[in-house]
Image (cartoon, helix red, strand yellow):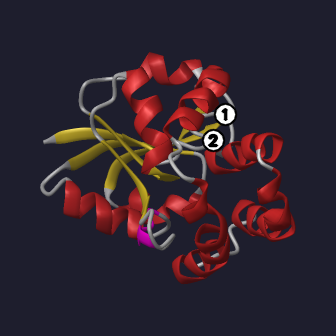
Amino acid sequence: MDVNVFDFDNTIYDGETLIDFIVYYIKHDIKIWKYIPKLIIIAIKDALHLFTVDEAIKAYASFLEGYYVHVGDLTADVVRFWNKNEKKIKPLYAEHKSDCDIIVSGTTDFILDEIMKRMGIKNYVGSQIDKKTGKFTRLCFLENKVKIFNELYPGAHIVNFYTDSMNDKAMMDISDNVYLVKGSKITKIK
């Protein structure tokens, strides 16, 4: 099966979903404030691509285990978040959208579920967190994206891959054509 694959953050979505979601919570729940210094460091390291998969898991662990597991049901908050942030979906995606698209993102699936439904995208994969423990059960990041993609979509052949970052080099390597997305500009690099 021939497919087009898109990264989500900074490719389809204008920004980093997790950072925007945390900022949303900073405004709505003061209990998250004690994690802000650690989250700022994580965001900087993530933006500068200074993480390995294992380091990313460890960096997010204390926040997820200390805050996320105690928040409760996030469904209504996720809906409100996307009501506010859906406008950050770049128009360029609508221009390239097809039925054979697969979104492969580091963003957690509980955040992606709502926006994928709104966008009519059925095939997507994100990171996954165990709600009871706060531990990642799947981190869709760096070379793990290829592993997860191949597990969930065996036999899929990537014709076109769109991303904003060289962090996705492993996905680039298994794609026929690669497009780098910066803002609203798309440049073919392979």
The residue depicted at 45 percent of the width and 67 percent of the height is 139
Q: Residue 46 appears at what percent x and percent y? A: 70, 64
Q: Nearer the viewer, residue 73 or 97?
A: 73
Front one among 52 and 59: 59
Q: Nearer the viewer, residue 132 or 88?
A: 132
The residue shown at (79%, 66%) is 35
Is 51 placed left or right of 176 in the picture? Answer: right
Instruction: Give the spatial CA distance, label 1 vs label 2.
Output: 5 Å
- Asked which quadrant contains residue 24, the reply is top right
Image mark for residue 127 = none
Residue range (magenta): 136-140
Circle 1 sits on which residue? 14
Q: Is residue 141 visible?
A: yes
From this view, report whether residue 116 is shown above or below residue 173: above
Q: Is residue 122 placed above or below 91 in the rendered structure?
A: below
Where residue 152 appears, x then y in whole percent?
21, 57
190 above or below 39?
above
**Tags 1 and 2 touching, CB below 8 Å:** yes
Quadrant in which residue 187 is drawn:
top right
Q: What x and y, as percent, mark residue 40?
A: 83, 63
**Mark 2 Cα-neighbour bin, 10 Å: few <14, some 14–19, many ≥20:** many
Q: Label 2's element?
A: loop
Q: Which mark is residue 10?
A: 2
Classify mark 1: residues with Cα within 10 Å, few (<14), some (14-19) or many (20+).
some
Three-letter residue code for mark 2: Asn
Whether residue 175 sits left or right of residue 178 in the image: it is left
